[in-house]
Amino acid sequence: MKHTLISVTIALAFACCISSCGDSEFEYTDSRCYVIIDNSAHQDPTLAAAMNPMSPGTFCQISESLIGGARHFVFKSNLGQESKSVENAIDQRRSFIFGYNNAIIVGFGSMDYPPQFYAFDAECPNCFDPMAIPVRSKRLQLSDTGIATCASCKRQYNMNTGGNIVSGDGGKKMTRYRGATDGPFTVLRVN
């Protein structure tokens, strides 16, 4: 009797888990992204502003570029700041994956208290096709209000509220990755 009761309880719990997953949208993508940047070593002010919970609404687009034979991180803020930082020896031993097409966006949203840290892919989730040949970038443009706009489909996404569509046709919200930071001059982790 006791064994049957335990079995029924486990079966009900399992059924509840399955039904609760249903058609709901997952918060994070299962697409590959792996970025770790130690801003205590780089001391980059553009990245630091986006990693500061005291400056919600500041977002930073991060990509990687080869400049003069050396790999650099390229940081562009929605507030107009832009900077580059050469990758150090520790960075060069890592295998970075910057989302779909070599760029991610990070920052604290301004609509939550306490502010929530977000990490997004920089490509439009409704226009960019990673399987297309050739791959054509549909990079989102950032505004100072925390809105990301696609030049192709004209959709606008609010990064302050998790990347939902606020203007344009319906569709998928911004592709979101797990991201974490402990402050402006600490380690950024996105996966």
Image (tube, rainbow, N blue to C red):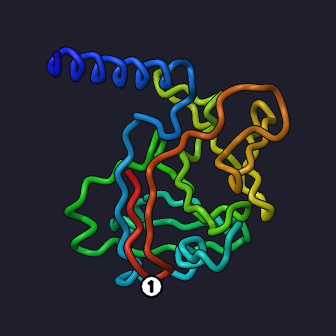
Q: Is residue 169 left or right of residue 191?
A: right
Q: Badge 1, how many Cα within 10 Å: few under 14, some, many 20+?
A: some
Q: Is residue 156 left or right of residue 176?
A: right
Q: Which quadrant holds the N terminus?
A: top left
Tell me what residue is drawn at x 57 percent, y 77 percent.
Answer: 52
Q: To which quarter of the image does residue 38 belong?
A: bottom left
Residue occupying the far right of the picture: 167
Spot occupied by residue 106 in the image (x, y as percentages of width and height): 55, 60
Determine the residue positioned at 55% across, 82% down. 45
Q: Could you say which is closer to the camera, residue 147 or residue 23?
A: 23
* Residue 49 pos. (x, y %): 60, 77
Asked if residue 135 shows in the view, the reply is yes
Residue denoted by label 1? 43
Quarter of the view holding residue 93: bottom left
**Residue name at image x 72 percent, y 56 percent:** 142
Q: Position of residue 184 (x, y in %)?
A: 50, 80
Q: Position of residue 57 (x, y in %)?
A: 71, 66
Q: Is residue 41 left or right of residue 21?
A: left
- Would you say 87 lies left or right of 44 here? left
Q: Residue at x 55, y 39 (%)?
A: 175
Give the residue type at disc 1.
Gln
- SS of the residue under disc 1: loop
Which residue occupies the foreground of this view, 166 or 75? 166
Q: Is residue 45 above or below residue 153?
A: below
Q: Give the camera-side residue of 114 and 14.
A: 14
Report the number of discs. Answer: 1
